[in-house]
Image (cartoon, grey):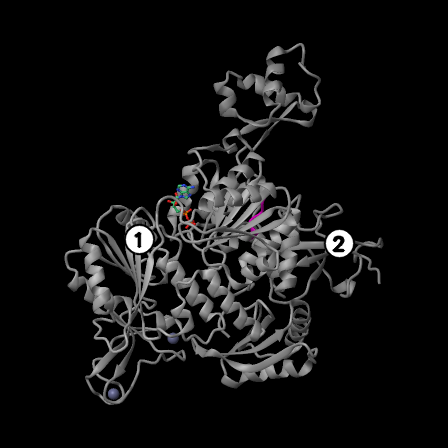
Amino acid sequence: MNLTAPDNNATAVIWRCAVPTPLRRLFDYWPSEDCDGAIAPGVRVQIPFGSRSVTAIVLNQTTDSDIDAARLRRATSIIDTQPLFPQPLFELLKWAATYYQHPLGEVLPLGLSPGERRGKPEQQLDKSALMLSERGRGLPDGAPHQAPRQAALVRRLAAGPVSFKRLASEGFSRLLINALLSKDLAISCTVSEDSCWQLRAPPLQANQEQKDAIDAINAALERFSIHLLYGITGSGKTEVYLQSIATCLEKGRQVLVLLPEIALTPQTLARFEARFDAPVVALHSGIGDAARDRAWAAARSGKTAIILGTRSAVFVPLDKPGLIIVDEEHDAAFVQQDGLRYSARDVAIKRAQLENCPVILGSATPSLESWLNADRNRYQRHILSKRAGTSVPPTPRLIDIRGLELTAGLSPDLLNETERTLRGGNQVLLFLNRRGFANALVCHDCGWSSECRHCDARMTLHKSPPGLHCHHCGDRMTLPKRCPGCNSTRLLGTGLGTQQAETYLSERFADYPVIRVDSDTMSNRQAMPKLIEQLNNAEPVLLVGTQMLSKGHHFPHVTLVGIVDADALLFSPDFRGEERLLQLLTQVSGRAGRAEKPGSVLVQTRQPEHALIRDLYAPYHEQLATLLSYRAQSELPPYGALGVIRCDSKNRQAGLAFLQTIKEQVTPPSTCRIIGPLPAAMARRKDRYRSQLIVAGPSRPPLAALMASLVEQAEAARQSSNLGWSVDIDPYESL
Ligand code: ADP
Ligand code: ZN
Ligand code: ZN
């Protein structure tokens, strides 16, 4: 039915708005009184919502509403004159809401800066440059003839904008500039000549494999294509990125580079800045809101040439993107686990398609998903099989520790090798996948263990400062002197953690600095840069750390890597467990011998016969083939598709009952299965009970349809305020 506005009789326009709420629907409003007519999709408006005033985004205009005209409310005001989303980004956000089945009102703000989400007007960039107006560009050669200086300035501007500073240095006076401005021949603008880029350092001489990759990417720069760059650690992937970026900048396009972590890898940013004299911005969790607002505006205007960011930067507005790079594409850090649950890698691929530009996925340990896509020729695969420069890959060796006498978890072999390396003036990295002192505190007499009061997990023993910490909910307890169960004093730590190894190693290698690297010691922003500086001095150092050490660092003087407990990673309930183990071990081993010095890798295990350990140093892609065949047999991704409805509730039964209800409302197609409801792997966390429905299908379309009907039922189901649920498409978290 057509509606009439409450205050006049003409057929009236209605704004259909996306509102930031978890409700999966759009909301209709009468246009605000400051609006004189049409509004473009994507424009922000201020609206009354319940008793609040919120910033919403107009999706489209309509003349129809399901809501009774008399009950429609009026929007308060319009915020933007034009949408802040470039069209491809707007499409991307809408795609993400549909694909991940998340409310559009919560997805669209991901493309806005923090201030913009709160309704602040778009940040104005300084207008520091001059460019020709349309009128100025239309002038005949040599005009205006009666004013030769003005004509010279017009000629100067013909090639593009020039900053006021540069014009002044070239002798063009302010008076002259004002003359062009007042004649409407020129306008001031934000794009300055400073945003033109230059090479600060020449590119390295690429080897043949690098050259092949660079040529293939450069040949594809004007259209959508997906490139999987599989290069062993130290093979020079970054050089391939840098040279592709240079070509892209030459074409006047922007580059978006996604990294799993920036704060921990200041080296990466430094390498970009060392190569390019160009406006580079780094977006990560450490940047404040004001800086983010500015960065957003600069990226949107095209002023920033290179944007480096962590996963959320995949939604940064770009004026003229020409290339997207996802470095360490296999990394779990690209997966967002709450709110909109998305994979920034997968979104980046969709974005490249919408922007019509290439995307490079780089890794020494590609994910099974990407590898299979390359096998199926959906991605172009480029291989860097050799280390760049003169460095040589490490020679690995397994140490079977069954029956051996261990000290703080370390075998005599590993200790001797550590000692030899330090004596030789080199650096050692011992990798232990567990922070804290010990896994748990247990009573030798009655078997009591340090269980968390809020989670189905044990609290970890920490020595400095002393106490028990739950790594899942953050709860802390003072260290009991006696067993709470039987009052015995014989309480022992079980399972080796980084603190314990550090304590022992500091005594044993008292002549050398022993440095622990985990999220406890690296929480300070300055810690990692300081550590890297210390490691760049070619002094002997012994590092003991968690997987944090596996992330893309370049440690030129590390020549020995010891993997203290490979088995700890082996028995994981997660279907990606083996893939992650393989990636982690390959990445960690890749830290050895990165520069001129040869490296070695020692792996301690009690499972030398296990296929993954036994073949650990077969080339990564050979092991991938084995893992892919397992996944094919069990119809798990990348062969099948998965989705999960997760639920958490105060009450143990309520979540399971809720999921059971919605499951009973839908009839799955014969190709799909609904598994559950089941308690999650860690059923209780932070005092909330977690349960899930797992949906498996042969491919994405039938799975998506089934998930959509489950979501619809969940929306409709009556639920208590103590129950929350969420949708996870292509889940990454353990099931
Ligand atoms: P990756 O990112 O694949 O781990 P990097 O790009 O960090 O590898 O390269 C490892 C080292 O090799 C760096 O020190 C880099 O400067 C050097 N390197 C890369 N390409 C070349 C090349 N073509 N010639 C000489 N050195 C190179
Ligand atoms: Zn006891
Ligand atoms: Zn806990």
Q: Nearer the viewer, residue 672 or 91?
A: 672
Which is more foreground, mark 2 or mark 1?
Answer: 1
Q: Residue at x 48, y 61 (%)?
A: 621
- Residue range in magenta is 315-320
Residue sitting at x 38%, y 48%:
266
What amino acid does circle 1 point to? Ala
**Point 53% across, 68% down: residue:** 628
The answer to whether residue 640 is left or right of residue 544 is right
Q: Position of residue 611 (x, y in %)?
A: 42, 72
Q: Which corner quadrant holds the N terminus? A: bottom right
Residue 425 visible in the shown view: yes
- What SS does tag 2 mark? strand
Kindly indicate the quadrant of the structure image that contains residue 49. Answer: bottom right
Type of the residue with mark 2: Gln
Q: Residue at x 35, y 59 (%)?
A: 589
Within-10-Å neighbours for mark 1: few <14, some 14–19, many 20+:
few
Q: Which mark is residue 527?
A: 1
Task: Name the quadrant where ligand 2 sits.
Answer: bottom left
Q: Which residue is mark 2?
A: 61
Gap in Å between the C-alphas at discs 2 and 1?
Answer: 52 Å
**From the viewer's perspective, is 60 left or right of 106?**
right
